[in-house]
Image (cartoon, helix red, strand yellow):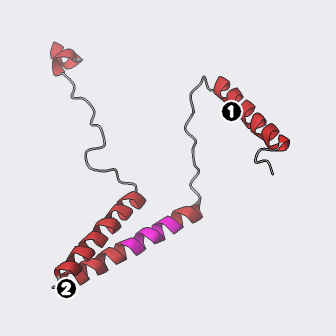
Amino acid sequence: MPLITPELAREYQRWAAMSRRANRVNGGHDQPQSSPQNPVDAAFLSEQCADVRTQMRRTITLLAETNDPRGMERLASTYSRLEESERTMSGRALPGTKKLPPERDISKSKLADF
């Protein structure tokens, strides 16, 4: 049985033509797609983030109670993964990834004329 049938080839050709047409309209650049925020999605994300924070608090409590080095290592690793998930869900960037605006030179501004 062939993997690519004539019908499938026509479908792929149609998709390629649509893509080429879209590239011509956009000037060859993909425009960012805006994803509308659905209130259900926002509520679900908020609930998930709250659950992750609860797990983080629980992990800290367990970490304070344990004396086993191997258990402490596993709990610390768990906390690290939970923290990364919480950071991603809350939409915070990694430290140092946001580029700060360049400092303005006052001598070139209109205030230097005074």
- Residue 114: in sight, yes or no? no
Most frequent secondary structure within the magenta stretch: helix
Residue at 26% from the left image edge and 75% from the top image edge: 74
Give the x, y percent position of residue 26. Answer: 62, 26
| Residue at the disc numbered 1 | 19
Q: Which residues are magenta?
A: 44-52
Residue under numbered circle 2: 66
Which residue ends up furthest to the front in the rendered image? 1
Residue at the extreme top of the image, as rendered: 113
Mark seen at residue 92 = none
- Quadrant of the rendered image containing residue 71: bottom left
* For residue 25, side relative to residue 48 (left or right): right
Vertical side of 36 occupied by 28: above or below: above
Name the one closer to the observer, 3 or 62: 3
Label 1: state its secondary structure: helix
Q: Looking at the picture, does residue 91 appear above or below residue 81? A: above
Quadrant the C terminus occupies:
top left
Under mark 1, the amino acid is: Ser
Residue 73 image offset from top left, x and y in percent: 22, 74
**Does the CB distance between marks 1 and 2 fall below 8 Å?**
no
Residue type at mark 2 is Thr
Residue at 81% x, 52% y: name it. Answer: 1
The picture quadrant where one finds residue 113 is: top left
Secondary structure under tag 2 reads: loop
> How many neighbours does mark 1 have within 10 angstroms: few (below 14), some (14-19), or many (20 or more)?
few
Which residue occupies 41% across, 75% down?
A: 51
Residue 3: x and y in percent read 76, 48
Q: Earlier in the sequence, mark 1 or mark 2?
A: 1
Figure quadrant of residue 84: bottom left
The answer to whether any part of residue 54 appears in the image is: yes
Residue 60 in the magenta stretch? The answer is no
